[in-house]
Image: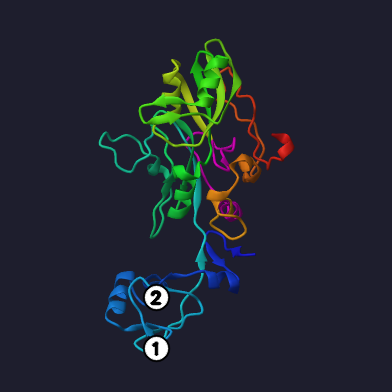
Amino acid sequence: MPRYSYKGRPLKASPDELEDHSEKLQKALATAGMGSRRDMEQLIADGRVSINGMPAKVGDRVKPSDLVKVNGRLVRLSWKRQVPRVLIYHKPEGEIVSRDDPEGRPSVFDHLPSIRGGRWITVGRLDFNTEGLLVFTTNGDLANRLSHPRYEVEREYAVRLLGALTGEQMNLLLNGVELDDGVAKVDSILPAGGEGVNQWYRLVIREGRNREVRRIMEHIGLTVSRLIRVRFGPLAMPSRLKRGMQEELPESEVQDLMKWCGLLKGNEPGGERDHEHEHEHAITRESHDERPPRGEGAKIGHPYRRRLLNKGER
């Protein structure tokens, strides 16, 4: 089993795992301390690099078993693999998910720790007036696997409506409504309590279209007065993470997340996974009930449990 060091993120892989791993030649040479990646590209283009005795080309990939020489001398390449960083953030209302805003509004990026030689990538987005779980990573493949529409990763929301949904409206949401950018539907929706005109629901969608939940509700004549994302795929927001707070996942959970996405050995590629059993792969952190903030009156029912769910519990 691969082992990860704390914070530094190098992964010591077994010989078999390393042999399946390859890197672009210019990157491998730069990692070995031979110079910048651009310098290495020029070195390769000048014909001064060989792989297994053959002249190398820019873009060639190398594996640990390959013999790489520069100017006829063998180069010892480094094959430490890196674990990405993953951070969860409880976005409050009134922050934009963008680095640049002509209006100068507060940005979620204002609060993130700096990264030497890299940058934080958002996994999906939340609009200015929506709060809740926002996920960041340093790995583009991981961000793509979680947020690209083709993978249909679940997003779960607590939504407060001005008014209650009828059974007919719930069926309409489950079957799909026609928006200006195509049919949109929810995977599940459950009443979650409320007082007076304010009614809470818990719903799940598999897309990340702009303002999708709000537009779905507007289509059937209801207004969203509050919207909180409480889960993204296998990652649920812990109750201890209050508005504006952030938390970096420990490496054991990052490893679980990578496996869930099919980006580490030991799991089928994520796109082929059976989404019906998605909750069974939820990353274990803690068990808690999701509730709206105190003072709202309405309690969010049907708690989402952070433990791995068994089939019989669904």
Left or right for 96, reference 203:
left
Left or right for 57, reference 262:
left
| Pointer 1 local density, CA inside 10 Å: few below 14, some 14–19, many at least 20 | few
**Picture quarter with the C terminus:** top right
| Pointer 2 local density, CA inside 10 Å: few below 14, some 14–19, many at least 20 | many
Spot occupied by residue 262 in the image (x, y as percentages of width and height)? 55, 54
Q: Earlier in the sequence, mark 1 or mark 2?
A: 2
Q: Residue furthest right?
A: 312
Residue 261 visible in the current orientation? no
Q: Residue at x 55, y 28 (%)?
A: 203
User: Which sits in the foreground, 42 or 59?
Assistant: 59
Spot occupied by residue 137 in the image (x, y as percentages of width and height)? 46, 50
Spot occupied by residue 212 in the image (x, y as percentages of width and height)? 43, 29
Q: Amino acid at mark 2?
A: Leu
Residue 248 visible in the current orientation? yes
Measured along the vertical axis of the image, is residue 30 above or below residue 313?
Answer: below
Q: Residue at x 46, y 31 (%)?
A: 131
Measured along the vertical axis of the image, is residue 211 above or below residue 246?
Answer: above
Q: Residue furthest left?
A: 102
Q: Which residue is mark 1?
A: 73
Measured along the vertical axis of the image, is residue 195 above or below residue 87?
Answer: above
Q: Which residues are magenta?
A: 231-258
**Picture quarter with the N terminus:** bottom right
User: Which sits in the foreground, 290 or 278?
Assistant: 278
Q: Amino acid at mark 1?
A: Arg
Residue 135's disc number:
none
Q: Residue furthest top?
A: 196
Residue 255 painted magenta: yes
Q: Which residue is mark 2?
A: 29
Q: Residue at x 68, y 43 (%)?
A: 308
